[in-house]
Amino acid sequence: MPVTQGDTRRSILDTAQRIMSHKGFAAVGINEVLSEAGVPKGSFYHYFSSKDAFGEAMMRSYFTDYLADMDRILAEPDSTSAQRLMNYWQAWRETQSVDECQGKCLAVKLGAEVSDLSESMRLALKEGTTAIVDRLERAIAAGLEDGSLSVDDDARTTAQVLYDMWLGASVMAKIHRDAGPLATTTTVTRRLLHL
């Protein structure tokens, strides 16, 4: 089966996510990504108009995949909403590994860095993280409805607090090279949801 332009573009974006989740955005050159992806160096601008446009496309691709995974977890059959939420947080712990995130922790790695470098990347991050909080809010509301959890605040505020807390814990886990902050955050999450 022949390789299409979409396949090549996707390969570039997937390779960049994997590399940049370890090194950051500014530290990675386009040539490194293209070489690792097996794409000729002169073809980058065929797929992206600039490094900034490339970064935005990478962030959007990341969130598309992330949100699809999240939707799958939050729609698991034969589970309460509370169980689905805790399954999501467990998946977070597994993919936000201190050593090997394999491109699954791009928002954690690049959030602060690119927000100051690129307005289009900042907006892609904002849209993606807002979509995550939207899904958490809906899951919490569903849990309130099915009685599997309760919260002291409204669903939106709780969703935002949980996401902020998990994002911060992921950064602290990387700083300390220890998963302890994620374990603590799991405990606090259960308390906030009264589980």
Image (cartoon, rainbow, N blue to C red):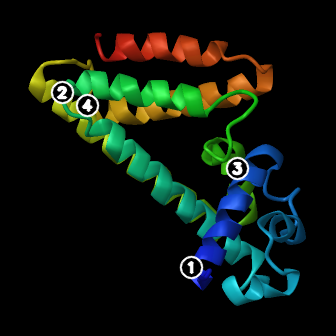
Q: Earlier in the sequence, mark 3 or mark 4?
A: 3
Q: Earlier in the sequence, mark 2 or mark 1?
A: 1
Residue 140: numbered disc: 4
Q: Report the residue marked by disc 3.
A: 110
> Hey, what amino acid is under mark 4?
Ile
The extreme bottom residue here reads 46
> Hey, what amino acid is under mark 1?
Met
Question: Can you give x and y, in whole percent of width and height, for residue 109 in the image?
Answer: 71, 44
**33 shown above or below 173:** below
Residue 1: numbered disc: 1
Q: Earlier in the sequence, mark 2 or mark 4?
A: 2
| Discs 4/1, front | 1
Whether residues under marks 2 and 4 lie with C-beta atoms below 8 angstroms apart, the answer is no
Please name the residue shown 76% across and 75% down the image. Answer: 51
Please name the residue shown 41% across and 31% down the image. Answer: 88
Spatial separation of the CA atoms under disc 3 and disc 4: 27 Å
Left-right relation of 90 to 7: left
Using the image as rendered, state which of residue 44 and residue 153 is in the foreground. Answer: 44
Q: Earlier in the sequence, mark 1 or mark 3?
A: 1
Question: How packed is label 1: few (under 14 Cα within 10 Å), some, or many (20 or more)?
Answer: few
